[in-house]
Amino acid sequence: MPHHHVGGSLTRRNVLRIGAAGAAGAAAATLGGCGGTVFGAADQVRYWNLFSGGDGERMQRMEAAYRTAHPETNLEAVTLTWGAPYYTKLAMAAAGGRAPEVGALHLTRLASMAPGRLLDPFDEDLLADVGVRRQDFPEHLVERASVGGELYAVPLDVHGLVLYVNREVVRPTGLLDSADRLAEFRGPADFLNALDEIHTATGEIALATANDPSSLWRLFWTFYRQLGGDIQLPVGERVQYDRDAMVEVMEFFLEVFDGNRASATLDYDAGVAAFQNGIAGLQLNGSWELPSYADALETTGSPDFTMLPVPAVLGPEPAVWVDSHALVLPHQDSRDDAGDRRAYEFIATLLENGLVWASGGHIPVYEPVSASDEYRSLEPQSNYRSTAADGELDPEAWFAGAGSDFHNQMGQVLNAVFTRSMSPDDGISQWERAMNQLLSTPSPV
Amino acid sequence: MSTPAVHTPAQGTGATSGPRASRRPSPRLSLHSPPALRRIPPGVWFVAPFIVLYLVFLLTPIALGLVTSFFNTSLAGGTGDFVGLGNYRELLADDAVASSAANTLRFTLYSTPLLIVVALVMALLTHRNMPARWLFRLAYFMPFLVPVTVVTMIWTWLLGTDFGLINGMLDGIGLGPVNWLGEPAAAMTSVVMVTVWWTVGFNYLLYLAALQGIPEELYEASSIDGANAWQQLFRITLPLLRRTTGLILVLQLIASLKVFDQIYLLTSGGPNFSTRPILEYIYDVGFTGLRIGYSSAISYAFFLVILVIALIQLRLFSRKEGSA
């Protein structure tokens, strides 16, 4: 244990003396301020992530790649449940200064993690040493990952809303040609007609969606951005948004959710089941659901599906909701070069194994992987790789981002509007009040 | 955690030689233990481990929570600044506090009577001699043993609007689909229904035990006097169950007021926050929003409401007991 890890008057002898006295609890409390290195074994990388299911399986393969390349380092990976509780735990660990060396988060949650206080910035020289540079990533992601010119997050992927298409159901309607290209939509009426045609052919809902707050937000943001709408959340001021565009998007969805084209009451699992069982010909969902359908196809022979970028429907540009899984350095009270280098090498290994990650539906953004022939020939993943460039991240605020209060406030309103228990105007007003209340609340981070 | 460990050996000697020492202190013990220690009654050593845990894990957090409610503490570090009654002033103006508290009270109002009446009816039915009585008793109690995650997962599928079993059956008899979890009134009904199905077994068990405690002779004697079954139910059974009903009412009110898990898992408080209980709002503010100071203040305000309800209940009951 190098000496500079142990601060103040706590020499090794003192620690031993306290230990001999048998008061282990007291020792832990006194050492609390000294950071993870006191408790962690010498050559250790601790990594917290929120990947379960198909993602978790792939992440474990990537972790195994690191263990093979660095057998001398003890990689301790902890998987916690997706959602708000994960961020609470990560924030509390960082607040105590004893956080894991590496953490995974959604890039949209960066602002809620107080970069500079709960997160430590990357040393870009050291990062370049392990083969990772700013210019290896799309500019808009690096911009979102930087605060005050310093890099706080290294993006692992972009994952966004995509259009899942059941070939067997959709091809007979002529909407999908033999090269898996979708007919072009010149406006919302074309899109609604296409859904009608699928419904007429099958007698079932044409498009599967989900009614949980985050899923509804993803749908809304996609088409609101296609109309050119934006949301600004300046803390201490009032929310800025385009009310007309919001109303237009909501009214568009009220036409979509007519019970035949799509159902506003379908929950997430029911939506997945509806597409997987060939009931719905189309689904708007995140690219992460690819492994479920691929597994189903392998075991049962259906659904025969492909994945395409969300088409431009309400505007000329195919804007689409995305988020990005990124790797961060949660704050530690004491850092040392050797420990940092191990953490950076681990991050570099994850990036280099981006193809494993891409097999789960995510879009790699580390250029050596995203520009590789192997990725470009991956089907159906490379179909929707344009989503990385067209993608629109959530608005930025301490209470916004994946699984946040922002998602919940907007999602609850959207659900009420789409199930017709609230008018679009009332819904927007309720959401606006909630936003202004959050904006007037002093940020806890 | 070190404190109980330190106490364990002391408790050990107290347990083995304590009772004897209190009557006639053995000379050997008095050599080693100071006189002050000997004056402590031996019972203290028995309750000490519990008292210590109670202090560390219950009383201290309760006191700390009260202190926190006067600060704008963030869960992401720092005690924050002292804001006095600022948090309490904020909650009075916060619509979400009022509406989520109202949801909790509404849930309590709907679920408590059902959970008592249904439990009583089921207990009366299965108290009679009947074929396959064990099966009915098992079936009525069984759901209580199922974990909340399983309960909500099953019911989410049953109550699904588009592909749910219940709407499928309704469709079979020509009734339109009900948006069970997505329409405010239906969602609260669904939550109460699921709660009754899940937790009524416990009250049922208490009633069944109480029924078995009523002496058979009372029924024999009354039937000789010509009482019919209804008269026996209202003049003998129900009055003798009153203490049990009182107990169930208290337990049920407490359980219903702290509702959180099944609602969080079934509707996450939706649609449009119409089923969000106050505990979920406290959780949202404190753990998702990291504002643990404000969320402590809401907890204490709600604690005050519960205290008032408890006092009213106590008064009502002591009067009843007195008149009986």
Image (cartoon, helix red, strand yellow):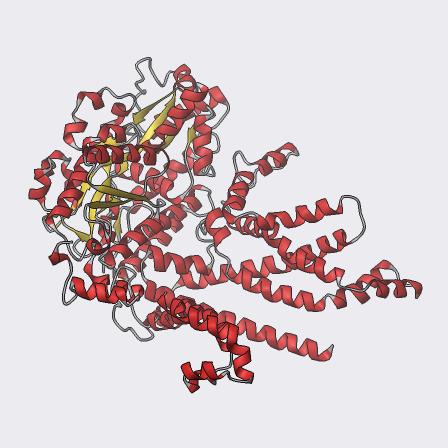
Q: Quadrant of the N terminus of chain A?
A: bottom left
Left or right of A183, for residue A10: left
- Could you say where residue A127 lies in the image, as x and y percent from the top left? 11, 41
**How many numbered tags mark residues here?**
0
Name the side, left or right, on which B209 lies relative to A243. Answer: right
Quarter assignment of residue A29: bottom left
Residue at image location 44% in from the left, 53% down from the top: B273
A98 on left or right of B263: left
| Pick the front one: A168 or A132 | A132
Q: Residue at x 33, y 73 (%)?
A: B70
Residue B301, by quadrant, is bottom left
Residue at x 46%, y 68% (from the top left corner) = B302
Q: Is residue B267 visible?
A: no
The quarter of the picture where the C terminus of chain A appears is bottom left
In this image, B66 relative to A445: left or right? right
Camera sees residue A352: yes
User: As displayed, is residue A403 above or below residue A438?
Assistant: above
Q: Residue furthest top?
A: A178
Question: Against B239, is A312 above or below?
Answer: above
Residue at x-position 76% and y-position 54%: B127
| Farthest front residue in view | B28
Answer above or below: position of A117 versus A348.
below
Tell me where residue B220 appears, x and y as whole percent: 88, 62
Residue placed most toward the observer, A306 or A364:
A364
The spot of residue B170 in percent (x, y) is 62, 37
